[in-house]
Image (tube, rainbow, N blue to C red):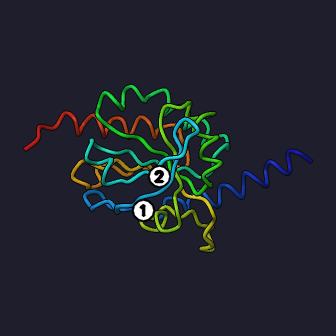
Amino acid sequence: MNRTLLAALAATFALIVPAATQAELPLGTRAPNFATQGALAGKAFGFNLAAALRKGPVVLYFYPKSFTQGCTLEAHAFAEAMRDFQSAGATVIGLSADDLETQKKFSTEHCRDKFPVAIATPAIIQAYQVQLKKPDGTVLPITSRTSYVIGRDGRIKLVYSNMDYSDHVKQTLAAVRALKAKPRG
């Protein structure tokens, strides 16, 4: 019985995953500005993309749902790499459709107080084209697993969309390091 249930869940997930990669913002376009509420180390704060970009590049990583296996492992991976991101001058923020209380708890338990997570409002989800949809087009109340690297100029430098969490840190860190290596001019 358990094998049948697991097989059914796996088949359902497999149908959803391909739809997650359908559309994201193109490289070089201006990232939509936004402000939202988030949490760092269990405490609420306001996040504004324009303000964060004044400090350096920003990694926005959208994740489907706090406290799920892939999202927890992804948060751990970003937490472990925070020194590298900070050395490269980047701000990292995770975004999901979870509410603020969930974000507070997730920021402490799985982001290990090392980086913030924030609420991806419906407007943010639409602006960044990270709606997760079923094959029939039904929009789910979660985001796709999509990471953006946004340069100080506000332009998208990397888009990486893959429901497998394992390469998001590697891809975004490489893009941030490449930005740091480029001479300004």
| Residue denoted by label 1 | 128
Q: Amino acid at mark 2?
A: Thr
Q: Amino acid at mark 1?
A: Tyr
Report the residue at 34% width, 47% height from top: 149
Pick whichever, 180 or 17, lies toward us. 180
Q: Residue furthest left?
A: 185
Q: Dividing the picture into quarters, in which one does residue 170 lie?
A: top left
Report the residue at 55% width, 38% height from top: 74
Report the residue at 55% width, 41% height from top: 43
Residue 93, percent across and down? 45, 44
Q: Which label is found at residue 75?
A: none
| Residue denoted by label 2 | 146
Classify residue 107 as left or right of residue 54.
Answer: right
- 3 is higher (above) or lower (below) than 180: below
**Under tag 2, what secondary structure?**
strand
Whole-angstrom CA distance, mark 1 to mark 2, is 9 Å
Residue 20, percent across and down? 54, 59
Q: Earlier in the sequence, mark 1 or mark 2?
A: 1
